[in-house]
């Protein structure tokens, strides 16, 4: 397969751009693994939700959600001057900043699919710890944007079903955690934004370790959802391959498993590096009414990317041409909005103020997971992102061709036509690629 440049996301030019620019880094040999955080500095005005850059990781795994401390500094430029909630709904006291469901659907050509598909289908989310306000926060988000209400029992009409389980599948949930509760709010809201008719299963691991999160992954897979979104990651290590079986879609036919690539710039995280996972990078997304698409996207400078130090490259990546400059598994496969400066509206009230703006590749991973649900999951027998690496799929992606997350001297950190590290093969243009 030759490298292609189909529908191209135009650069931001003179429009609003991310305030965060990559810091020049010493060139890294392209065959070597990317190092997390290489060539990128954490900016002021952002707060990592849990154990991320700028706060110091306190656990083996950190979530990849970033809060914009001052929502008024949001730069996304709404397409519509009036952001009204659904008919008959009362607006929140302060109009939320950040992209809402209608805007995200419009940006990725999903408005029709989001309105028509997903009913009776389930998207699963795996996170660590418990969010005691998950149901009420989710209900507030959905009510604000006129989405159907939330029920906790299956079979009720006119609502989506929300189920909350522990990593063992029980209703005895783990201890609560403010930071991971923010992540959970991001994840629930993004699935709702893209697949508003989908039921949601939230599986909460006992702690933020690969072992516990992996156990939660198996519990989620046992429910046979169409997709499982994972918005967390940790540094690569020689032991990571022992966890690959948790994310192996060969044994879970039809389930798309997504994982965020990280928020520390050039470098590889696990489980995004796992061969059977769909690794989701990030972009800066800006509404631009003067363009054919109505939006522009560039690679987000904080998105993780690079060459895995331990995971083998899959056949479908070997067929990309010109060849990916990496002997092992390359990250990412696909992308969506992740820059907090052009982030999304999220409602979280557990130790927080309510409406705020979030970014991070957590946002992107859940958007892509929900897109897979709209598309009906993976075809039976499909492994990981293999279906994305076809000419037919690439025709249905917006190819992001500008921006970077470091100065590594190759496509591993610089957006270009076709595949590149920060954005993979591109961002959704409807569900055709999925």
Image (cartoon, rainbow, N blue to C red):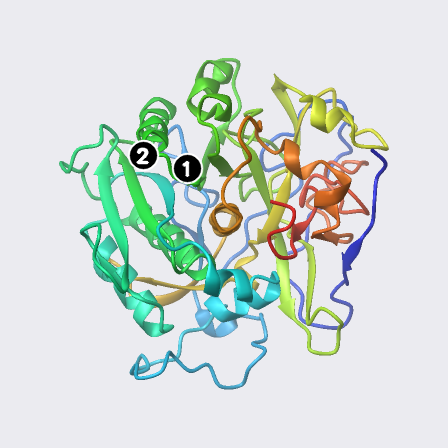
**Does the rendering let one see residue 146?**
yes
SS label for mark 2: loop
State whether residue 280 is above or below residue 310: below
Q: Residue at x 76, y 22 (%)?
A: 31
Dot 2 surroundings within 10 Å: few (below 14), some, or many (20 or more)? Answer: few
- Looking at the rendering, in which quadrant would you find the C terminus? top right
Badge 1 element: strand
Closest to the observer: 412 or 119? 119
Q: Earlier in the sequence, mark 1 or mark 2?
A: 1
In percent of width and height, residue 422 lies at 67, 43
Mark 1 burial class by Cα count in 10 Å: few <14, some 14-19, many 20+: many
The structure residue drawn at horizontal position 51% and vertical position 71%, both measured from the top left corner, is 73
Q: Do the CB atoms of the residues marked 1 and 2 lie less than 8 Å apart?
A: no
- From the viewer's perspective, tell me whether residue 111 is left or right of residue 136: right
Q: CA separation, marks 1 and 2?
A: 25 Å
Q: Quadrant of residue 89?
A: bottom left
- The image shows residue 43 at horizontal and vertical percentages of 55, 54
405 left or right, relative to 113: right
Residue 79 coordinates in the image, percent (x, y): 59, 78
Q: Which residue is mark 1?
A: 62
Going 69% across and 78% down the picture, which residue do you hit? 289
Q: Which residue is mark 2?
A: 223
């Amino acid at each position: 397969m030759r490298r292609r440049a189909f529908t191209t996301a135009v650069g931001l030019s003179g429009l609003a751009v991310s305030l965060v620019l990559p810091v020049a880094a010493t060139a890294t040999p392209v065959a070597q693994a990317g190092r997390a955080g290489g060539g990128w500095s954490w900016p002021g005005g952002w707060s990592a939700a849990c154990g991320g850059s700028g706060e110091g990781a306190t656990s083996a795994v950190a979530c990849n959600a970033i809060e914009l401390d001052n929502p008024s500094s949001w730069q996304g430029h709404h397409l519509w001057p009036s952001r009204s909630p659904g008919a008959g709904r009362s607006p929140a006291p302060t109009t939320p900043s950040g992209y809402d469901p209608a805007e995200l659907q419009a940006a990725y050509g999903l408005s029709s699919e989001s309105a028509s598909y997903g009913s009776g289908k389930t998207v699963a989310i795996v996170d660590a710890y418990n969010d005691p306000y998950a149901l009420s926060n989710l209900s507030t988000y959905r009510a604000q944007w006129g989405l159907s209400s939330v029920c906790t029992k299956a079979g009720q009409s006119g609502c989506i079903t929300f189920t909350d389980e522990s990593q063992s599948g029980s209703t005895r949930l783990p201890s609560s955690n403010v930071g991971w509760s923010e992540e959970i709010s991001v994840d629930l809201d993004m699935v709702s934004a893209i697949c508003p008719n989908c039921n949601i299963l939230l599986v909460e691991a006992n702690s933020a370790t690969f072992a516990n999160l992996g156990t939660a992954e198996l519990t989620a897979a046992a429910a046979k959802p169409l997709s499982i979104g994972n918005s967390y990651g940790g540094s690569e290590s020689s032991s990571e391959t022992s966890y690959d079986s948790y994310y192996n879609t060969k044994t879970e036919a039809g389930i798309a498993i997504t994982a965020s690539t990280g928020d520390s710039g050039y470098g590889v995280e696990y489980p995004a590096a796992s061969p059977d996972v769909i690794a989701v990078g990030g972009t800066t997304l800006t509404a631009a009414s003067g363009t054919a698409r109505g939006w522009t996207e560039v690679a987000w400078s904080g998105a993780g990317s690079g060459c895995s130090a331990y995971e083998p490259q899959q056949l479908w990546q070997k067929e990309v041409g010109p060849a990916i400059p990496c002997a092992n598994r390359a990250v990412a496969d696909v992308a969506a909005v992740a820059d907090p400066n052009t982030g999304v509206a999220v409602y979280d009230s557990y130790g927080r103020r309510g409406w705020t703006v979030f970014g991070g590749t957590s946002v992107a991973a859940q958007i892509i997971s929900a897109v897979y649900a709209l598309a009906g999951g993976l075809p039976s027998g499909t492994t990981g992102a293999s279906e994305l690496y076809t000419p037919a799929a690439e025709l249905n992606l917006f190819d992001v061709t500008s921006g970077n997350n470091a100065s590594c001297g190759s496509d591993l950190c610089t957006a270009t036509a076709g595949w590149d590290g920060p954005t993979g093969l591109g961002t959704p243009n409807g569900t055709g690629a999925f």
